[in-house]
Amino acid sequence: LVIVNTPVGTHYEYAKKVLLAGKHAVVEKAFTTTVAEAEELAKIATDKGLKLAVFQNRRWDSDFKTVQKIISDGVLGDLIEAEFHFDRYNPLLSPKAHKETVNDGAGILKDLGPHLIDQALALFGSPKAVFGDIRVTRENSLVD
């Protein structure tokens, strides 16, 4: 078993090497930067009889587990709309170059977004509609 926990833009490359070497793989979120890459990795794993999983650490957080239980117990009734967001504004740029340069895995959507998207899917299944508001909020930042 190999765990791929590298900058997002490298997940596909490393996970593919792991699978082609005949090893099971756990890939940190975000899984890949394109659907085509994800589909290719899934096909390789299936063809080789290997396990391939995406690690979503927030699924095990106590706050999420509590919300999941409240929803499954019907405490809130029928939910028709949900809002997910992070309140993490930081005016300083990250010292991690892969998070601040334009590349396939950069930006908040691909770094933190998978947590929220995964939680929404785990709680409610596939949505009927999605709205997103993404913007650059830090001076001198090249990514969202």
Image (cartoon, rainbow, N blue to C red):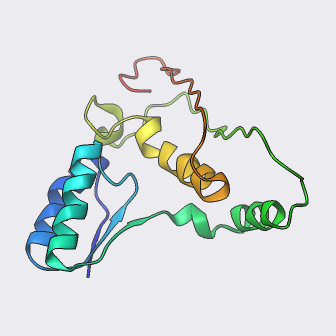
Left or right: residue 65 versus residue 2 is right
Instruction: In this rendered view, identify the residue nearer to me: 43 or 2.
Output: 43
Residue at 89 percent of width and 52 percent of height: 77
Query: Looking at the picture, how far across and down is residue 139, in whole percent?
Result: 47, 17
Residue at 12 percent of width and 79 percent of height: 22
Instruction: In this rendered view, identify the residue nearer to me: 38 or 137.
Output: 38
Instruction: In this rendered view, identify the residue nearer to me: 12 or 82.
Output: 82
Query: Looking at the picture, how far across and down is residue 18, in whole percent?
Result: 15, 71
What is the total number of numbered labels drawn onto the structure image?
0
Query: Looking at the picture, how far across and down is residue 16, in whole percent?
Result: 15, 62
Which quadrant of the rendered structure holds the C terminus?
top left
Q: Give the answer, above or below, for where 114 lies relative to 104.
A: below
Residue at 11 percent of width and 65 percent of height: 17
Q: Name the residue furthest left.
A: 21
Left or right: residue 74 versus residue 96 is right
Q: Give the answer, above or below, for where 90 lies relative to 21.
A: above
Q: Quadrant of residue 143?
A: top left
Which quadrant of the rendered structure holds the N terminus?
bottom left
Left or right: residue 47 versus residue 100 is left
Q: Quadrant of residue 101?
A: top left
Residue at 58 percent of width and 32 percent of height: 130
Instruction: In this rendered view, identify the residue nearer to me: 57 or 22.
Output: 22
